[in-house]
Image (cartoon, rainbow, N blue to C red):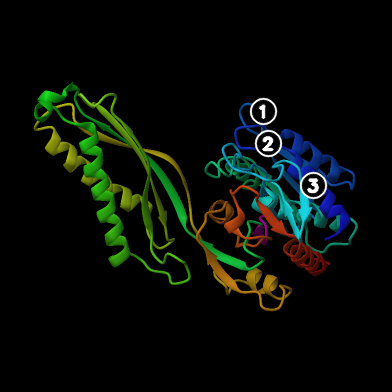
Amino acid sequence: MSSRSLDILKRLIGFDTTSAKSNLELIHYVQQLLLSKGIDCTLVHDDSAGKANLFASVGPKEVPGVLLSGHTDVVPVAGQAWTQTPFEATVSDGKLYGRGSCDMKGFIAVAIDAMLIAAEQPLKRPLQLALSYDEEIGCVGVRRLLDVLHLAPQRPFLCIVGEPTNMQLALGHKGKASYRALCHGQEAHSSLAPLAANAIHLATDFIASLRTTQHQLREQGAQDAAYDIPYSTVHVGRIDGGKALNIVPNLCTLEFEIRHLPADDPEAMLAHLAEQAEAIAREAKKVSGVAAIQIQTINAYPGLDTSPTVEAVRWLSAFAAPGTEQVKVAFGTEGGLFAQRLNVPVVVCGPGSIEQAHKPDEFVELSQLQACERFLHGLVGALL
């Protein structure tokens, strides 16, 4: 790994860009690096002006470019048993430790270095960089950037999202939709429990319906053997209800998600679940007329399913390292949004393993960073 890439990565890790905080110090640092080579940047801020996306392009403007995309935010470190300093890069035993080293500041550092190299080359096709905020809380920030890129006269020829794939070419991932169910009952003294609608009971009945839906998806839904879990999944992650043991609860809230194959329609799944919720509430109304289950959408992003036969994928595969495989990954990325909004082929490819992401003592192997550097250097060469 070049000393410049390593220095950039150390600086990036030094910025605490936990999603709850601003990312502007990091964005301004990157902006100044790019400006030093004459690369203009566009910043797209959030409503508070406390966070920003960055877009930069180097090379000819009249032809489609190759876009390198990454998110600048990281997950929290609170409550984790770190033995390293989270926001200070530490190199030891062939690994670089630090929050975001793997997910995904390692890729961003190498991508910035590639932009700086490309700025000094006679490119025939532009190289572009997109950095987003708030990916970790549902791919939130990049949507504003896509609103701007959607209006550009040229769409990218290819988008590479640098999430950690051990430098394999990931052509697909599942979409995700997250929901909150508000289960309403009626308060009563627990000695009179049968005369009131218990909100927790409504919630558990609805959870049973979710589990039945999961069974149906496993047995009858779409299947894709390229995934570790080859079918769409339904998962309940949070539940909150009740004030005291001797009070029949009037409210229970649960949060659940659907991680769906591109072949499955989450809206159709939600419609089915809404019917089940209505049937559960209708039965509870026989006890209390206030019984109800309301389902709210928290967030959603689409899956990714890039064909291996498209020109951009064949072009990229030509200079990938020998033995590089085309795979699909279980985790979600911003790639589905780029494909959906810009109608551009997307490949997810970056250094490190998702198994290290979000953990204490997060790390990326230096060999992976070196492989990423060779890959992006090859990409720059292919743009000449």
Query: Where's residue 70, x and y in %?
Result: 67, 50
Residue drawn at x 29%, y 66% is: 219
Q: Residues within 10 Å of mark 1 (few under 14, many from 20)?
A: few
Crowding at mark 2 (Cα within 10 Å: few <14, some 14-19, many 20+)? many
> Looking at the rendered structure, which numbered label has been put on residue 79?
none
Task: Report whether residue 59 is seen.
Answer: no
Amino acid under label 2? Ala
For the record, the magenta segment spans 154-161
Report the front residue among 74 and 348: 74
Q: Single out the mark in the foreground, 2 or 3.
A: 3
The disc placed on residue 49 is 1
Disc 3 packing (10 Å; few <14; some 14–19; many ≥20)? many
Amino acid of disc 3: Lys
Instruction: Tell me: residue 112, above or below residue 15.
Output: below
According to the image, label 2 marks what residue? 52
Which is more toward the observer, 318 or 199? 199
Q: Which residue is mark 3?
A: 10
Three-letter amino acid code of the residue under disc 1: Ala
> Contact (CB < 8 A) between labels 1 and 2?
yes
